[in-house]
Amino acid sequence: MTKEKPLHHVVLIGFMGTGKSTVSKQLAELLKCGTADIDAEIVRREGQAIADIFAARGEADFRLAETAALAEVLGSSDPLVIATGGGAVLSERNRAMMLQDSFVVALTADPEQIIARVSEDAARPLLQGDVRERVYKLLEDRKHAYAFAHLTVDTSDLSVRQVVELIEHGIKMRF
Ligand SMILES: Nc1ncnc2c1ncn2[C@@H]1O[C@H](COP(=O)(O)OP(=O)(O)O)[C@@H](O)[C@H]1O
Ligand SMILES: O=C(O)C1=C[C@@H](OP(=O)(O)O)[C@@H](O)[C@H](O)C1
Ligand SMILES: [Mg+2]
């Protein structure tokens, strides 16, 4: 009988504005482990802001940089809480890497909550123009994209602290 490999990292997936970046930092504090945000890693590796990579090099190039950053971070020997960008799950290769030795948590939120949260920050290149229209269109395109997670947390009516505690509980149940 083959023994199941222990899960090393916690990976947060989910649509833009569901709270991945914010939750990852607080969850890492609670779990007393390191943290990484793939968007921040891309900026560090490429020496360019996310919006500038989209504008100057296009989305396909951004996705290549995203896969490279994800592979590097997942290779860390220290256990990490990892916030991905909302589109990282669109690649089969990325999904396979995430499932290799990580506990994958999907964050969700109602469309109107997402719109309210992302409207505070105009930096997301895929939400330029009519934010409401863009969010509804992308939510439809990605409606099944986050279903591969081990655990899904609807953050709509929860504080960041409550989300963090639910994930901690889910991790305890899993191990
Ligand atoms: N549970 C929550 N309740 C209210 N606001 C939240 C919650 N989680 C995140 N936010 C806010 O929503 C915005 C987007 O959060 P962020 O962590 O950047 O999301 P993501 O990384 O998933 O795009 C931020 O202003 C953040 O403070
Ligand atoms: O959903 C997406 O395709 C994207 C989400 C963003 O991250 P957040 O989900 O953290 O906003 C960032 O990676 C980029 O703007 C593309
Ligand atoms: Mg983020």
Image: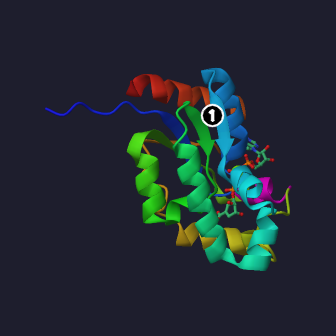
Q: Secondary structure at mark 1?
A: helix
Spot occupied by residue 123 in the image (x, y as percentages of width and height): 83, 63
Q: Quadrant of residue 102?
A: top left
Q: Quadrant of residue 174?
A: top left
Furthest residue to the left? 1
Spot occupied by residue 135 in the image (x, y as percentages of width and height): 68, 68
**In the displayed structure image, the side of residue 117 where residue 62 appears, left or right:** left
Spot occupied by residue 65 in the image (x, y as percentages of width and height): 63, 64
Picture residue at 60% right of the left edge, 23% below the top: 31
Q: Is residue 71 visible?
A: yes
Query: Quadrant location of ligand 2?
Result: bottom right
Picture residue at 48% right of the left edge, 58% below the top: 94
58 above or below 45? below
Q: Chief secondary structure of the magenta span?
A: helix
Residue interval drawn in magenta: 113-120
Spot occupied by residue 156 in the image (x, y as percentages of width and height): 65, 45
The answer to if 83 sits in the magenta stretch is: no
Picture residue at 65% right of the left edge, 22% below the top: 30
Q: Nearer the viewer, residue 54 or 44?
A: 44
Question: Image quadrant for the C terminus?
Answer: top left
Q: Nearer the viewer, residue 93 or 27?
A: 93
Can you identify the residue that label 1 sits on?
163
Of the residues shown, which amino acid type is indicated by label 1?
Answer: Val
Question: Image quadrant for the N terminus?
Answer: top left
Picture residue at 58% right of the left edge, 45% below the top: 73
Q: Nearer the viewer, residue 165 or 60?
A: 60
Q: Is residue 158 visible?
A: no
**In the displayed structure image, the side of residue 80 where residue 116 appears, left or right:** right
Indicate if the residue with disc 1 has its beta carbon within 8 Å of ligand 1.
yes
